[in-house]
Every structure is written in C-alpha cells, then in structure tokens.
Image: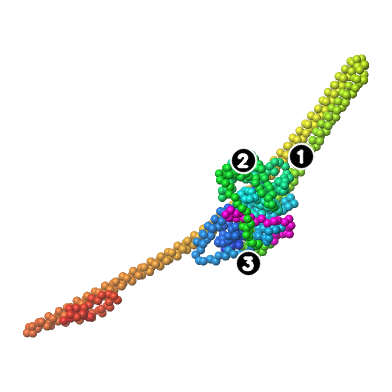
Amino acid sequence: MLRLLRRTVFRPLAAALLLGLCAVGSASGARASESFYDLVRLAQAGANADDMIDYVHHANGRFNLSEHERTVLADLGVDDKVFEAIDEHNRAWEQAQVEPVYVAPATAQPDDLQWDEEAAVPDGDTVNQDVFYRTLSPYGSWFESGGQWVWRPTVAIVDPHWRPYCHRGHWVLTEHGWTWASDYSWGWAPFHYGRWHRHPEYGWVWTPGLDWGPGWVVWRSGGSVCGWAPMPPTMGFRAGVGIEFSGGGSDFGLTSRDFVFVAVTKLFEPRWWDFRHHKDAKREAFEHAPLAHTHLELSGNLIINRGLELSFVERLWGHPVPRFETARPSWKAGEHFRPSLVEGSKVFFFRPTVRPAVTVLPNAIVQARENRFKQFEVARDSRFSKAQVELRVKANERHEALAKEMEAVQERQKQRETAAEASRLRNDRLVKEAEVKRIDVVRKETDNRADRDQLQRAEEDRKHQFEAAKARDAQASKEAGQRRKEADAAEQKRVADAVEAQRRAQDEARRKQDAERAAQQERMKQLQDQQRKAAEADQRAAAERQQAELRKQMDAQRAAQAEAQRRADDQRKAMEAEAKARLDASRRADEQRAQQEKALEQARRDAATRSVERERQAIREERAPQHATPAPAPRAAPPPPPPAPAPQPAPGARDDRKDGDGRKDGDGRRGR
C-alpha cells in the first residue's frame, strides 16, 4: 500500500513541485533561504535524488547554502549526489558569468524562513515530553495512531529503504553496553527514547518514551553474522524483572524484515550499512542466527544493553573492541542540535530527564510552522512576476488535489480493511458455529454411550436378580439380547450417519468459504491491477509531459545559445575586417612615403650633376687662350630649371652633403 501511495501521490506531487519550483527559482536568482526552502519541500513531497538533481540543473542561479542548511537537508534524507550536483551547478554558473552578479549571503534575511527554530536545545537537564514534539517537527511529521502520537522522519519518505538503527550511525561499546551513535542531528531522541515499529501504511514510525537507553534493540548472532531489530512498543522494561512483552511468540513479534544483518568483520567499517544482507541472505541469516540473550539491567538510573556477546565479536573481528566513555555535550540553550560526537575516548550524548507533562501538542506546532510557510511564500511571491505567482499557485493547487487524492486512497484502503475485517469476523463466527455443532454431536454421542452403559448395568442387575429364571428364559433373553444389539447397532449407525452428514455439511460450508475468499482475493487483485495500471498510465503521462516541457526548454536554450554564437561570430568578423582595413591603409601610406623619398633622392642627384657641369664649364673658359679666335657664340641654351629644394633630412638620418675643403657645402657645390 505504501508503494502504491508513492506511485500515485508522492511522485506526481514531486513532479508538480519540481516544475513550479524550477519556474520560480529560475527568476529569483535562487537566494539562499529560497533554494533551501524548495529542497525541503521536495524532500517532504517524496522526491528522490534524481528529481532533486533535475531541479538543481534547471535552476538559473547560485545555491548559496550555509553549512547548517546542508546539515538540515542531510538530516531530511537528501542524498550526497544532490550536494555534488549543487556544487557542480555553482561552479558552472560562476564560470558563465561575464559581469559580477550579486549573490545573497548565506545568513538569513529578515523576511527569510527560520526552518528549524523549534529544534533548539532546551534549557535545563529536565524537560517535558513535548520537547520531542517541538524538536522533531522540522525533520518529520506527527500523526495519531492507536490513540497516541507517533513520528515518521522525512528521510523515510525520501528513501523507502531507510530503517532505524541502520543508516548514518554505528555501534560503540561504552559503560552502558552497545550504544548507538547517530550521525543525524535529531538522533539524540528517537534512538535512545521510546520504541520503533513498522506501520502498515507509513512504514517505520517512532513512539516517544521517557527512559533513556543506549539502544532499544534485540540481537541475533550466529555463524559469522550478527543482527539487531528495534524493540516494538509492546516491549517494556522494569527494574528487577527485565523485558516485559505484552504480545505472543518467542521472537517478540519480529520477522526477518525487521532485522539488520551484517558480517561481524564489517561491523566497524565507516559505511558498514553498504555491506548489510538483503532478501535471501537476510532470511537465511535470520534462520541460522538464534535470538541472542537480550540482557538488560539497571545501573543507577541508566539501562544497560549487553545483548551481543563481546567475546563472539572479538573472536571473529580479530581485534579488541575499543571502549568509550559517555559524556554530556557542552551545548547551550537555544543552539542547534548536532550529531553524536566521538572525540578521543569519549562519546557525547544529550540525555535529559523527561517528564510525562505535555504543554503543547504536535498539531499546534505543525500549524504554527505552516502559517510561517504561508507568510514566507507571500513575502517570496511578492518579488516575482504575476506569471510566476500563478505557477506557484497552480503547484499549490496540485499539491492540495494530490493530498485529497491521497486521503481518498487512504479512505478506500480503510474501507477495504473494514470489509476484510468483517469477512474475517464472519468466517470466525461460522467456524465457531461449526465447532459448537461438533461439540453438540460429541456430547450426544457421549450421552448415547452413557445410556448404553446404563442399560448394560441394568441388564447385569436383572441377571443377578432373576438368576433362577435365566435358564428358563435363556432363549428368550438371548433373542432379546440379539434384538437389543441390533437396535444398538442401528442407533450407532444412525449417530455415525448424523455425524458424517454434519461433517460433510461443515466441509461443504468450508469449501464455500474458501471459494468465496478466493473470489474476493481475485477481485481485490484485479482491482489492485487496475489501480496499478491507472497509476502507471498517469505516471507515464506526467513523465511524458515533463519530458516534453524539458525538451522545449532545452530547445529554447539551444536556440538562444545559437543566436548568441551567431552574434559573436558577426562581431568577430567585423573586427577582423576593420583590422584588415587599417593594415591596408598603413601599407599604402608606407608605399607613398617610400616613393616620395625616392623622388627627393633623384632630385638631389640631378641637382648635384648640374652643379658639377657648370663648374667644369667655368674652368674650361678660364683656361682658354686670350688670342684665340673667338668661336662663334653658341646658340643660347635654355636656362636650366631651378634646382628642387633639398629635402630636409629625417631626424636622426645621416647628412651626405659636404662642406669645407674637398667636401660638399650646403648647396651641393664643391669648394674651390
């Protein structure tokens, strides 16, 4: 029934919350308290590790969880894989940020929800019984069962294979015997006070108690394994008497399902629960490991459990078992509870004296927290858009609808159980009526036998009284005796036939009852198959819708990434084109500068050549003889073009013009 509820209620509820929380969390930036609140809600809805990891992957923001919030989530049963996904998401989110983005601090804001404000260390060493109601409410749910309040931890909803005295804890040997040291911050109460039992609908639940004990379990040991199971609420302890059990049977009503078996060589491993036996190996260990002598004794005001033989453990383990001394932790009133601390040779336990007084009931505490949740949601939704608020409202409506559906399923289950109980009572009544009839038949047979005995005694008396007439009436008496024998035989046959007819009627009634029971079981099986098929169809439809939504979101993300990549490529191409244009302009400017320098150099050489020719002409004219016949004046040549202005040398360049004797002067003419 619990598996059916998880398939039909918890998983669809977790999916609805996942969609709603992802839509809201993606716009909020996942503030510290909001992301913590969402993960808590997912855990309470029965979401498994894969559902939470999907929520983390689809969140658009950084999960800035504090160490205390991580501890609370671990106490609620959140798997280590979820924390690894959160760390990976934070790293990827930080690498994707181009500009600094504001991240909310890990400390609580004024409008944030204080999740476990009830789970605080009480003041003093003597407390009331309602300390269990207050401190355990954040980590589970309270409900009435059998006229008393019981508590189911949230970790039992997240992990259907969870069981007490198994996960996140280990056994230590102290002066109080085998003592359970839990790694849950709430483990100080349920593992040392009260009793655990398996509820037919909700699984493992805890009933509060007043006496502190190192571990309320019974032990089995044999071969190379040892096992233990929580004591049911029907088991009590009284000083000077020992264990008192109100039920029947030598196994205290416990079966192999209730026990945890592990090899003694693995008992002290850090994660010993990974080596525990399952299914067939567990049943085999239960059959071959007899019930150990669960020896409980009272020393002062403390109960000591020495159910597992120390010599048996040390012989198989091959090492002496370390001894520890119990001590009280130095926790102050108002602080958060912490797991059991093993430090050196001491192990610390918080173990106050509990009074039976109750000042507040769990339903009032739960209602107060729900009111705070609603206030938190109102303050949170005020920061979101209208569409996001509508998504959360739809998620809440789905939550309420699924809760009503769960109540309807529970009501139908109760009706079926009532009908089965009525059928069982009817069968018991028929069996009792058949037994009464059988007793009546036996009584009649006994009366007939007594009548026959009385007749025989009367006959003997008559024989003694009429001994003289016996010879005379021998033949008549013999005939009368024969007739009486025949009558007795006929009477016996009649009684036997009546008994046989009664037996046949009983067998026929039993066969009819068996046929009716088989038909009823077949109808119940068909109904369960129909419900299972309907639940699987709903689950497949919800999964397909969720996958379609996820594919749509992934397509949108891929399109946005492709658009961003295209824009980046266009920008890169534009920058490359601009750089190429600048490079071409620079190359053309260098070519023009080189051509100008080459033209200036050619002009300087031409001017120097013309200057040298003029000087040579002047020298020839001076050396010509005075009496020579003057040659006819040559035709006037056109005046030479004016020399081009000499370019100024570049700063730092060498000046090739000479001055002084044998060197060129400033205007390029050689000195005389």
| Secondary element at tag 2 | strand
Nearer the observer: mark 2 or 1; the answer is 2
Of the two numbered discs 3 and 2 on the same chain, state the one appearing first in sequence. Answer: 3
Residue named by callout 2: 222
At x 55%, y 57%, the residue is 86
- Labelled disc at residue 614: none
Q: Residue at x 42, y 64 (%)?
A: 573
The answer to which of 595 and 210 lies nearer the viewer is 210
Q: CA distance from mark 3 to mark 2?
A: 58 Å
Residue under numbered circle 3: 110
Magenta span of residues: 341-369
| Residue in view at x 59 percent, y 44 percent | 313
Disc nearest the viewer among 3 and 2: 2
Position of residue 13 measured from the top left corner of the image (x, y, whole percent) = 64, 54
- At x 61%, y 62%, the residue is 33
Residue 465 in percent (x, y) is at: 92, 20
Crowd band around label 1 with a 10 angstrom C-alpha radius: few (<14), some (14–19), many (20+): some
Q: Is residue 576 left or right of residue 107?
A: left
Label 1 vs label 3, nearer the camera: 3
- On the image, numbered disc 1 is attached to which residue? 427
The quarter of the image holding the C terminus is bottom left
Question: Is disc 3 placed on a helix, strand or loop?
Answer: loop
Residue 349 shown in magenta = yes
Q: Earlier in the sequence, mark 2 or mark 1?
A: 2
Q: Does the image show residue 393?
A: no
The amino acid type of the residue labelled 3 equals Pro
